[in-house]
Structure formats: structure tokens, C-alpha cells
């Protein structure tokens, strides 16, 4: 497998190309490959792929995309080229499990196989904005969720009464973020729980600043180094990947999902991009954990719900391809980049659908939050606990794919057409002192839980 130094050299010596030409060429190449491999949605409301030959064709198409088109370094405007042997070697050599955290709080995060029925990995919280006065208490509450394997960091705009801008303040804020995370997990009684630093800024100095085995990011912790849309990367993230690789930390690709409506085109084109981006994250940053799937770029701006069966099916194809032909540890992206916010009925319905999809695809439970996250209003611990509760109910219900599809369609039909609900502030719908939803939100949660139980899930 090629080294990160090989990748760094290729970002300096690869063929020059303008961003516009790269994007338009990517759109054309993906369309060509979709036609070549005859990939199409079978229709009839199918939500999960059940044909292994489809996953095989999708994998070959995704590999060919990466081998014949490459990835693109935004920093240098150069194409990073990969041979087929290099890509296939990377798929074999990716670790199928990662140990995160330290001591009694260490957790094994591993690759599952679709339809396998195993307990799912989970990262329950953050990847969201919170103000500094709430931060340690927020972290404590998410660390108290027993199913959580590791937590991602928090982003914020002010610290110590100063606006965070410019490299010195950004580096300082990065260290403050790590310290607050450490304080929160200590208060929760899980001092060894793994943390994944969420970048305050993606400059290399700011990414590296929180490395500190005593007060910051430890060797048993990790950081987010995400691939960008349209198969793009940056030298700053590659720099951090090299440094953290020597340090020993794990890395998370939060950007492995494809955005249909962008330059990948349709949901079917998104399958190819999701596969290629997930492999690319391992090759170019050594991301050992990947959030992946196919979602719509337009979902975050819609005023009413429209959940498309094709996008859920496309995610299942991409995940099955990665599971069958790579060792990448994958988590599942949201059904539709959650439109509503916490404190609302529709938000819990969206999360429940995502949990069902993850349970069937055996994809880890990635952070749930409102897609367009708002300060102190992006997520509460209830959504993460509901995420895990639904996934466990799916496994307990022992329904076949047809049965699970009926459950999902029943919920989707009740959700589609509803207006997108704005979020509530976390302190208005959740009691952070007693780690429980406030009465109004609890009643909403019980109502949604009853809906999913009537549809066919067994909550025990």
C-alpha cells in the first residue's frame, strides 16, 4: 500500500487541473461508469439491496472511478492518481477493527456484515456547535450513554470572551476544546473514553495543536479528517494525518457520504462516489472509521419532508460493496441529513428511520443532529439513546427485509409532506443536570416510540 509520503508527493507532482474542469469531468466520468456497469434503481419502493451482484458491480465501478479519475488536491490544484493495484491493496489492508480509548473505557469498533444482527458501534454525540458555558455538561451527558464507543468534539465561535478567528486563537481554542472534552468524560466517570477532535479550523497548525497526552488529545484518541465532496482533499489534513499517524491516534472520515445533486449527479452516481470517497479517506488520510452512504444535497433546504426510497436503497448498495470487498469500518449516514431539530416529533421519526437502516445494513450509529446545526440547538442525548434503542428493537424483532421495509414505509408515509420543524434549545427540552428529557419532549418521544411499535418493532 502506498505511504502518506507517496500521497504528499503526488499532491505536488500530479497533473494540474482547474477546479471547474475537475468537477465537470467528475460528473461526466461517473455518468459513463453508471452506464457501463448498468447500475439502476429497481423501483417498487425497495429500500435495501438484496442482490450481491449489484454490490459487486458497484464496487468495481467505484474502484474504476478512483483509478481512472483519481482524487483532487484543492491546495495545489493537482490530480492525485492511483493505480488499480494500489486501490485494491488498500481495500485489503484497511483494519477491520480499531481499539479506541484507554483502560476499562477502551472499546473495540469493528466492521460488521449487512443483515448480520450484531450489536452496532456508536458515536452518540457532538460534531455540533455548543457555547463554552454548556460544554463540559453537554459532554458529560453524552458520555453517560452506555452504548457510546467514542465522542466527537464540539465547535464554537467564542472562548474566554474572545471571538475565535486567526491561527493563534484557533490553536488556543483547539486546546480548550480538548480540555473541555476531557473534563466532561471525567465527570461522567469514563476518563478513558475515546475522543475524536472536531477541527476548529482545518489549518495544519490548528489540527495539531490539541495533541497532548496529559491534557488534550491522547494517543488512544482520534480526530476528524474528512474527505471533501467531489473526491477532493487538502494538504493541511494530509499533514495532520502524517503527524497523528506517528502519534498513534485513530482517524475518522466524517465525509464518506455522497451528496446526490452535486457533481456525482443522481443517487446512483452517489453510490460510486460514496465507495470511492470511503476508500480514498483510508488511502489519503488513513481514516480507519468512515461515515458513508448516499444523501441528497437538497434535503437541508426543503421546507417539507420528502424521503426518497431510492436514496435509502443507494446507501445500502454502497455499504454492502464496502462490507464485501474492503475491511473499512463503516458507520451509516442519516436517511436524509435530518431536517427537523431536537425537541420535535419529526426529528425523532427521522432518527428512527436512520436507526432501522443502520441496523439492517449493520452500519455503525453515527452522530444524529439537525443537518443545519444551530448553536446549542443541534442535538440532545435523547436522540442518541433513541437511535440505539430503535436499532436494538430491529434486531430483537427478527423481521425479514420485506417486514422491515413495511415498517419503514409506514413511518415514511406519515412523515412525508409534513413541514420541517425548527429545533428547540437543548436547555428548553432536556434536563442536563438529571440526564433526562423534560416532560414535553418525553411525551413526544413516547408518542413516536408507540408509532414505531405499532408499525412492528419489538422494544422488549
Image: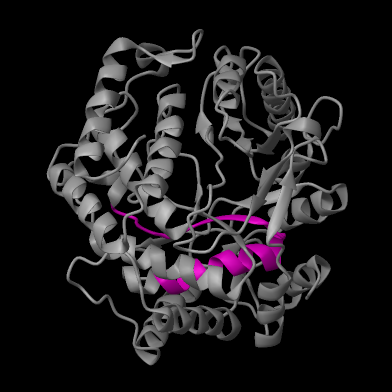
The residue sitting at 14% across, 43% down in the picture is: 414
Determine if residue 139 is in view: yes
Q: x, y percentage for residue 174?
A: 70, 31
- Identify which residue is drawn at 14% across, 39% down: 418
Q: Is residue 206 above or below residue 28?
A: above
Q: Please say if 301 is above or below 319.
A: above
Q: How many marks?
A: 0
Taking 314 as reference, is 405 left or right? left
Task: Assign the N terminus to one quadrant of the image.
Answer: bottom right
Q: Is residue 388 left or right of residue 74?
A: left
Q: From the top left corner, tell me how far across and down residue 316 is, in percent.
A: 40, 65
Instruction: Describe residue 348's horizontal placement relative to residue 233 as left or right.
Output: left
Q: How is the image coloured?
A: one colour
Residue 295: % across, % down = 36, 57
Magenta stretch encompasses residue 294: yes
**Magenta range:** 271-298
Q: Quadrant of residue 142?
A: top right
Q: Which residue is at the front of the view, 306 or 264?
A: 306
Q: Is residue 322 left or right of residue 217?
A: left
Residue 228 drawn above or below residue 351: below
Indicate the quadrant where residue 190 lies.
Answer: top right
* Residue 264 shows in the view: no
Amino acid at each position: 500500500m502506498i505511504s502518506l509520503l507517496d500521497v504528499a508527493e503526488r499532491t505536488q507532482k500530479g497533473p494540474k487541473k482547474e477546479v471547474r474542469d475537475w468537477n465537470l469531468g467528475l460528473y461526466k466520468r461517473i455518468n459513463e461508469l453508471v452506464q457501463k456497469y448498468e447500475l439502476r434503481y429497481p423501483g417498487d419502493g425497495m429500500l435495501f439491496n438484496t442482490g450481491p451482484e449489484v454490490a459487486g458491480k458497484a464496487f468495481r465501478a467505484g474502484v474504476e472511478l478512483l483509478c481512472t479519475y483519481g482524487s483532487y488536491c484543492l491546495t495545489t490544484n493537482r490530480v492525485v492518481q492511483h493505480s488499480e493495484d494500489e486501490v485494491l491493496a488498500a481495500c485489503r489492508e484497511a483494519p477491520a477493527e480499531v481499539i479506541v480509548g484507554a483502560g476499562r473505557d477502551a472499546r473495540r469498533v469493528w466492521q460488521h456484515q449487512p443483515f448480520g444482527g450484531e450489536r452496532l458501534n456508536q458515536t452518540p454525540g457532538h460534531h455540533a456547535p455548543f457555547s463554552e458555558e454548556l460544554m463540559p455538561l453537554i459532554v458529560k451527558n453524552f458520555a453517560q450513554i452506555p452504548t457510546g464507543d467514542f465522542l466527537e468534539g464540539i465547535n464554537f465561535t467564542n472562548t474566554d470572551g474572545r471571538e475565535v478567528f486567526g491561527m493563534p486563537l484557533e490553536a488556543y481554542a483547539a486546546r480548550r476544546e480538548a480540555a473541555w472534552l476531557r473534563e466532561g468524560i471525567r465527570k461522567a466517570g469514563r476518563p478513558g473514553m475515546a475522543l475524536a477532535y472536531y477541527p476548529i479550523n482545518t489549518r495544519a497548525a490548528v489540527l495539531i495543536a490539541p495533541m497532548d497526552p496529559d491534557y488534550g488529545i491522547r494517543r488512544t484518541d482520534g480526530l476528524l479528517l474528512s474527505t471533501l465532496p467531489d473526491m477532493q482533499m487538502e494538504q493541511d489534513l494530509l499533514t495532520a494525518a502524517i503527524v497523528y499517524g506517528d502519534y498513534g491516534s485513530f482517524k475518522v472520515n466524517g465525509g464518506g457520504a455522497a451528496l446526490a445533486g452535486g457533481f456525482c449527479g443522481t443517487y446512483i452516481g452517489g453510490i460510486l462516489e460514496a465507495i470511492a470517497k470511503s476508500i480514498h479517506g483510508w488511502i489519503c488520510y488513513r481514516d480507519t472509521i468512515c461515515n458513508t452512504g448516499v444523501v441528497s444535497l437538497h434535503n437541508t433546504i426543503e421546507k417539507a419532508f420528502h424521503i426518497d426510497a431510492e436514496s435509502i436503497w443507494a446507501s445500502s448498495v454502497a455499504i454492502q460493496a464496502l462490507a464485501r470487498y474492503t475491511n473499512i469500518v463503516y458507520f451509516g449516514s442519516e436517511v436524509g441529513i435530518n431536517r427537523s431539530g431536537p425537541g420535535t416529533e419529526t426529528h425523532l421519526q427521522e432518527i428512527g428511520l436512520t436507526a432501522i437502516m443502520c441496523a439492517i445494513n449493520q452500519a455503525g450509529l453515527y452522530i444524529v443532529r439537525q443537518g443545519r446545526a444551530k448553536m446549542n440547538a443541534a442535538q440532545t442525548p435523547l436522540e442518541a439513546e433513541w437511535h440505539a434503542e430503535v436499532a436494538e428493537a430491529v434486531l430483537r424483532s427478527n423481521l425479514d427485509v420485506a417486514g422491515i421495509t413495511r415498517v419503514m414505509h409506514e413511518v415514511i408515509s406519515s412523515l412525508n409532506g409534513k413541514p420541517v420543524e425548527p429545533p428547540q434549545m437543548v436547555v428548553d427540552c432536556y434536563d442536563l443536570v438529571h440526564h433526562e428529557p423534560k416532560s414535553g419532549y418525553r411525551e413526544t418521544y413516547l408518542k413516536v416510540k408507540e408509532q414505531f411499535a405499532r408499525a412492528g418493532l419489538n422494544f422488549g
